[in-house]
Amino acid sequence: MKKHKIKKRDLAKLLSEWSNEFTILTPSRAEGATKWTKWDGVDTTFLDWYRNTTVPPKALFLPAMEEMFSFHRDKEGYHIEAPLLDTPKQLVFGIRPCDARSLALLDMTFRDAYEDPYYLAKREGAVLVGLACTRPYDSCFCTSLGSSPDDSSHVDLLLTDIGDEFLMEAITDKGNKLLTSTSFTETAGKAAETRAKESKETAYRKVTRKINVEGVKDRLLSCFDNKDYWEKVALKCISCGICTFLCPTCYCFDINDEFIKNHGERFRNWDSCAFPLYTKMPVENPRPEKWQRLRQKVCHKYEFYPMNFDVIGCTGCGRCIRLCPVNWDITLALTNLPAKAECEQEK
Amino acid sequence: MTTADISHHPKFMAKGNVYLPHLAVVERIIDETGDTKTFQLNFKDEKLRNDFTFESGQFGMLSILGIGEAPFCISSSPTRREHLECSIRKVGRLTRALHRLSEGAEIGFRGPYGNSFPLDLLEGKNLIFVGGGIGLAPLRSLIWNAIDNRDRYGNIDIVYGARSPADLCFTYDLEAWDKDKTVNVATTVDAGDDSWTGRVGLVPVVLEEVEPPAKNSVAIVCGPPIMIRFTFPALERLGFTPEQILTTLEKRMKCGIGKCGRCNIGNLYVCRDGPVFSYAQIKDFVSSEY
């Protein structure tokens, strides 16, 4: 696999070159919350402010609202217009290692049993160009989950900041191909690699928030019915759902119809286990209480994902901590889990 | 029978975009009770009409385009393929709209989804069906299935109840089963009326009066949660082990295929891992949110 480097001031040229083949998506703060939008062809100043986006990159593959199909009605009945599920060639530039990992976690659900054609069509055409973190947030805890600010496991190409330049390491064939045609990069030497290693080690040390996830699945299992604990944990939660909407691995969605003048659409939109309506049936609701819903959120990631896919469904990106309006903290909820014996007493 | 035996093994899986419904025509609507109707459906597409198969216990996502979509069990038997039937109680926005439909209306159907009653494990066994209210719908698919393959099963007992005589569903089926000498039917109501001459009593109580032998038997239970909660212990008193008790669960669902998230009980999704579960599995559930 190729190892190249590029001068930061040449980055726009490189992105322009890639844009012949791909739609380039970069972090942007054009519309309030920072998120991924189509690159304007010029601006690379996001490098100055970008630490991570508020809206995670899942939105590129599972949009907050997405039309599934449209239909109309005439004398002969209903007619369904099936969507063309094309595979757009998108290059996500600068995705953080934790967020790249989140997509790998989402893939597990969307590929499981029945394939989700909407998500997978977009996913298959995507190339992920990662950017190793140099300034993690206080709320980040990726290193507790087997990852790191420079984790290259789920990107195609990894960039590391080495001062005036980026080291570019191809990880997959897709990433290697990105480095074949370009005239703005050059092969990286020993010096660049040494500087990249220092940069990565410094970043690693900056991730200071730690949790112990050893045996967390079993610890949650034994605490599942400890109502007192979950009530205490959920006390300040206001069920606003922000932690789920902005979580890179939360994928729950609702499906709804609109119908006006014989023409309609069925669309899906993000939903959240924080809301009582999420599970409400006409006669009963299995999770009417706030503490039950918050427990679902924590257990889905740290208990049920490990049971179903043998991996924790959280990346430690810290969004749910830093974006929570009441400073709810999942790491505290996990760290303070009572011991098994204590939970059995509660039963 | 172990928990692994009732796993997900769909035989008919829709190809392509699984979220696209197939259009079906409501050929006939049968009034079951004041708030429940059975809809007989047939696909508009002739190829699908011939190719479509399902198994007893599976469900479909039914929709009125423009109103919405929800899961309903298929209440007809795969042994009777003239049409699909779904029996629907009026409880919410979509079901109210379904009840306003006339014969000839078009609706959307996608599926079948979920696992099914494990016929291979039921073969050679006595079958005891315990149903309450509209809960007879999924059992009915299996009852006709068993009657149409009568020599594969031992005794067939049906204990069915509703709140009042007017709330009894599938009365035409109950009459047919009653006439069938190879089937024992005990129909009961929580409270009778002037014209009611049958049994009065709650389903779990009547079940214990009927006293089906547990040996070489499987009980299949579906009804309102309160009935299920009292039926499981009644069956255990009759000597049934949790492995010998099957039920089918219901949850709010949007996708039907294990993606949208909401129908989980612990790590299991009712749509993907169920809806048919044994009582042994339920006892093992992480969560009591069922």
Image (tube, coloured by chain):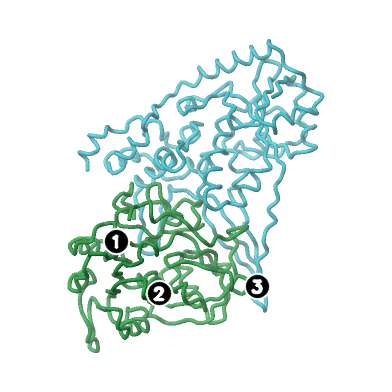
Q: Is residue A319 left or right of residue A299?
A: right
Closest to the camera, between mark 2 and mark 1, is 2
- Chain of the residue on which disc 1 is drawn: B
Q: Quadrant of residue A98?
A: top right
Which sits in the foreground, A83 or B81?
B81
Instruction: Tell me the residue that label 3 is attached to.
Output: A73
Q: Are marks 2 and 1 on the same chain?
A: yes
Residue lying furthest top: A191
Pointer 3 local density, CA inside 10 Å: few below 14, some 14–19, many at least 20 = some
Q: Relative to A111, does residue A36 appear above or below in the rendering?
A: above
Closest to the camera, between mark 2 and mark 3, is 2
What kind of element bears circle 3? strand
Q: Residue at x 64, y 12 (%)?
A: A195
Task: Give the spatial CA distance, label 2 vs label 1.
Answer: 21 Å
Q: Residue at x 67, y 75 (%)?
A: A74
Q: Residue at x 47, y 56 (%)?
A: B9
Task: Give the spatial CA distance, label 3 vs label 1.
Answer: 46 Å
Q: Relative to B17, does residue A249 appear above or below in the rendering?
A: above
Q: Is residue B130 visible?
A: no
Instruction: Tell me the residue that label 1 is attached to.
Output: B245
Q: Please state the horizontal and vertical placement of residue B97, each as a whole percent of the image.
A: 50, 73
| Rendered-image quadrant of the N terminus of chain B | bottom left
Q: Are marks 2 and 1 in contact (CB under 8 Å)?
A: no
Instruction: Tell me the residue that label 2 is attached to.
Output: B149
The colour one sees for chain A in the rendered image is cyan
Q: Are marks 3 and 1 in contact (CB under 8 Å)?
A: no
Mark 3: amino acid? Arg
